[in-house]
Amino acid sequence: MKASDFSSISGSQKRRKAIQIIVFLLFRISALICACGLIIVVGFIALKGLSSINWTFLSQPPSNLMTEGGILPCIIGTIYLSLGAILIAVPIGVASAVYLTEYASPGPLLRAIKLGINNLAGIPSVIFGLFGLAFFVIYLGMGVSILAGACTLSALTLPVVISSTEEALRAVPETYREASLGLGATKWQTIYRVVLPSALPGILTGTILGLGRAAGETAPIMFTAAVFFTPSLPSSIFDEVMALPYHIYVLATAGTEIEKTRPLQFGTALVLIMLVLGLNLVAIIYRSKLRRRK
Amino acid sequence: MSGSTDNLLAAISSGESRPRKEKIIRLIFLGIATGSIVTLALIVLFLFSEGIPIFKQVSPHQFLFGKFWYPTSDPPDFGIFPLIVASLLVTTVSSVISIPLGVLTALYLAEIARPKMREVIKPAVELFAALPSVVIGFFGMVIVAPLLQETFNLATGLNLFNASLMLAFMSVPTITSISEDAIFAVPRDLKEASFALGATHLETIVRVIIPASISGIATAVILGMSRAMGETMVVLMVAGGAAMIPTSLFDPVRPMPASIAAEMAEAPFRGDHYYALFATGIVLFLLTLIFNIIAERISHKYRQVGAATL
């Protein structure tokens, strides 16, 4: 090999390194844009919304044709709707996940159930709204109500609960099950005495994530539960409610004075963000702690 | 101690009823687990039963390819072609932004980020995915729209481009987190073999890591596009709402979810308009279903199980 060959190799080596540096810079910039996106959106809304949040805003109903006052009915409505959705979705979701991880054997039935869950997760939220309207509101006669909204939202949160419960159940070591079965416990005793208790923290994480998801959704409750304005707080699950996401939408697009109520809109958006991101943050931190412990 | 032994013995001797009880419990769980399929079936059933009647008024061809959507004029026009075009356009334009951004971020996180950075950026991306869509829509409406209007001197900042931009930010987290999982799962020995042959890190990424994780990346991209297509609040608030075929990137549009969400409240119950909106829902449902089935096929067929499958 001649000396010139070596120099060309080292030359191309330099070029290859230079290209790598440039392309990696591109990677870094992309990641920076993604991280900044969150900071910019949340930052802007926090900056503009913080001044309108005070005790009156959080504890009073809207007044003067929704141009003044607070958002108490919306906060309460959102809490009712998302808790209702979770109350329905968690038992069904946990039981489904138990079947999938503990009982099901590979085959067409398992594939069909998995296909159902995956496709349910991919359905656009407005389709859930249409379904809720046609099925819960009209066909089952629930009317526009907390119950109909919570049922619709539960269909949407079900895949979230199932997938995180599955993950939690799969993380339970196989030796736990074998030890329990070896002591003579039945499969069911093993599941509810050994497997479920050890998977409980993971299931809880999934529940919190589902709660956050349900609280932030707008389209599914537009035709099933939410209204512009209610003069009083809901007294039963058959009442219609105001909700935070819908309130933002209404104030920003159809309110009587859109410009005048901007501070209220920013305030409501900030409350919703804090609620949803707060729930997610709790879940993420909790989950990463759980993963580290293993 | 002896008490519990007795219990155990009793339990064993009553072994006859134990398998039966176990069988019943198993069946109960199976029944509940089919809940997702039942829900999916009910969604399809009600979507179709409330949507099909519109085809007594207009033919499916007229409905899908009719260029005019004037559901409340007399006589009404039920042509959703402009809405379909709008949905496809916002999805395409948003993917042009979100695919490079999402995949490059995933590569950064999985390949070159230091663990500390990864621990900060990954949760940030996950949190971004959790941001309610109405908040993104609100942001696009109140902050991005005036900015666009002034910089490009437009009639309105609520348009195709703004909606695509906001949708891109909504689908980036989906694309990033699924592709990152796929890239992270590439076997270490493949990477080391490439290094041993003298390839740089970048060459290894381009020639080895990306080909090995391409099915996961493709799944991520398709799921991200499906999310953009079905997203409602953003296009409802930001796209501008004009039901016409756009001629420029800055024209207002009315994608299908926006049309359904905006008009459902005022459509008379079981009138033609109501049926037409459900039929639009069928089209939207089928389009996203196609995306989801393709994603499923890819991730199922080309699942990376080890170096041997390359």
Image: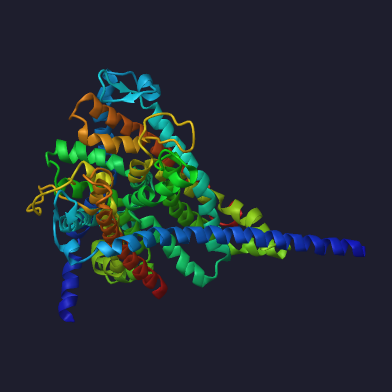
Relative side of A222 to B147, left or right: left
- Residue B148, how many percent across, how many down? 45, 46
How many labels sit on residues? Answer: 0
Relative side of A155 to B224, left or right: left
For the residue pair A252 and A72, the one nearer the viewer reads as A252
Relative side of B138 to B251, left or right: left
- Residue A184, how many percent across, how many down? 26, 69
Q: Residue at x 52, y 60 (%)?
A: A31
Q: Residue at x 63, y 62 (%)?
A: B191
| Figure quadrant of residue B242 | top left
- Residue B253, how many percent across, how many down? 40, 35
- Residue B260, how many percent across, how many down? 29, 35
For the residue pair A187 and A224, the one nearer the viewer reads as A224
Quadrant assignment for the C terminus of chain A: bottom left
Quadrant assignment for the N terminus of chain A: bottom right
| Figure quadrant of residue B196 | bottom right
| Residue B186 visible somewhere in the drawing | no
| Figure quadrant of residue A173 | bottom left
Residue that extends furthest to the right in the rendered view of this protein: A2
Q: How is the image coloured?
A: rainbow
| Residue A86 visible somewhere in the drawing | yes
For the residue pair A33 and B249, the one nearer the viewer reads as B249
Q: Residue at x 47, y 65 (%)?
A: B121
For the residue pair A108 and A273, the one nearer the viewer reads as A273
